[in-house]
Image (cartoon, grey):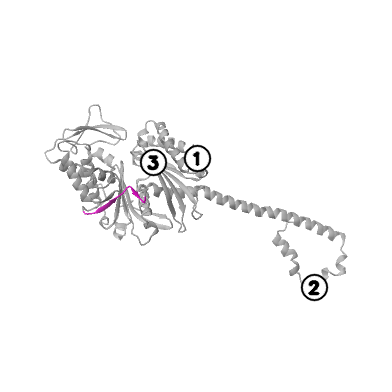
Amino acid sequence: MPYLSVAEEQAEWGTGANVPAHKRNRETSPSIMKIGKLPCVLLFVLCVMLFITYIKWNPRKEQAVDASDLQIKTTHELGGLSSKNEIFYGIMFDAGSTGTRIHIYQFSRTPSGAPNLDHEEFRALKPGLSSYADNPIKCAPGINELLNIAKKEIPQKLWASTPLVLKATAGLRLLPGEKAHKLLDMVRELFKASPFLIGKDSVSIMNGTDEGIFAWITVNFLTGSLNNAGKKHSGMLDLGGGSTQITFYPYSKNTLTSSPPGYMTKFELFGNTYSLYSHSYLGYGLMSARLAIMGGEEGKSLQEGEQLVTSCLTPEFVTEFKHAEITYKIKGQKNDEPLFVSCYKRVLALLGGKVEHSKEIPNLFFYAFSYYYDRAVDAHLIDAELGGSLKVKDFDMAAKKECKLIEEAPGENPFLCMDLTYITLLLQESGFPMEKELKLVKKIDNVETSWALGATFYYTSILNKQHS
């Protein structure tokens, strides 16, 4: 005989209140007392089985509650976003060409559904990860040092639920494939030994276009435009050591239809869909461009006694330039024309026709980061701590000034003439008029304006899905 649930039992027998009147009268009549042995036995067996059914049914209800509690706990442990104002963390390693940086973010959930950034801890180490290409084990002390910082910043009970991700940028993109893979394998083993949450894609080389998109997310999250439909989105310019990115939200239909293949990308974030113009130029970061301007090749050492000769340095001035752990001997070339003119021609030869020119750029507001900021500080165009606004022509005027100064003597920064000339032409070739104003900052609301925050939003979501 099958077990009966409480609902089935009530359906079969009914309750006293629901039993028809004629049946209630019959139950109280003397004839009902004349019950045979067989019905008594059956009634007894039925009562025992009903009791067993109750015992078996009741634990099932408790198990369902336990499973529900476990599900809530799992969501919490994965840095889940289900509870209002829940505190959770994310760790992002930025393995750039000139250094490795760690961003430790503390978030809380807001009623609107978007996370709120409560705090960021930022540290950096030099040199870049690519410097250990020939001996990957040497990167371990630096990675472990940064991991220990994360342990100190994050409560121990949340270690296992905190996503840990490393994304390498241009420095590793420029390495031969086998060397890059060995470096990443080394980092992956170090991450696995840590107490943090690791996913399938937690250690990898990031696509250059993604780098620009994540930086755009960071800027527009911090400026509030992602949560305010009435606020116009800002564009983003990033000039790294090995690559440079430009990303903006196009308001012109012409940009959407006329952009080259691969320049437009679409993604979803915080319940909204965005179509962005974004492109990364590998090999056109400031340090890689500097090497190319002087006639060097990425990853290729000079022969004994060989030197690079450039028209962008003080004539006859001899110095050295170290890039990606290779040291190059450099000598300034004699020129029959002003140094700025000869340098300008050399840089234009490198950039001419290599950078896409967008007609919508003059109508948009742009933030500029990294070496745009650093070289503006070196040229005394902005405050070193606060940053500031400037026009493209300010870079141009500073380049002419620096080139004039080093015609006779190299000064303290012999490469500044070349760098400022390159920045001026890079902006012009991209479609920025001389009168176009840029906002140069390192932080917005005291948060580093790098791609790392935007990437943390994305990869935290991915890891949550993988472990949910």
Q: Residue furthest top?
A: 304
* Structural distance between the alpha carbons of marks 1 and 2: 72 Å
Residue 41 horizontal side relative to residue 264, left or right: right
**439 in the magenta segment:** yes
Q: Viewed as shown, does residue 460 lie left or right of 418?
A: right
Residue positioned 32% across, 33% down in the render:
325
Circle on res. 195 = 1
Amino acid type at mark 3: Arg
The answer to which quarter of the image holds residue 97 is top left
* Residue 316 drawn at (x, y percent): 16, 32
Task: Report which residue position mark 2 lands on.
Answer: 22
Sequence-wise first label, 2 or 3: 2
**1 or 3: mark nearer the eye:** 3
Q: What kind of residue is marked 2?
A: His
Residue 369, magenta (yes or no): no
Q: Which residue is mark 3?
A: 123
Give, as a single range, the part of the protein colored magenta: 435-445
x, y percent for residue 393: 20, 50
User: Tag 2, which secondary structure?
Assistant: helix
Q: Residue furthest bottom?
A: 22
What amino acid does circle 1 point to? Pro
Q: Tell me the element at label 1.
A: loop
Q: Residues within 10 Å of mark 1 (few under 14, many from 20)?
A: some
Q: Residues within 10 Å of mark 3 (few under 14, many from 20)?
A: few
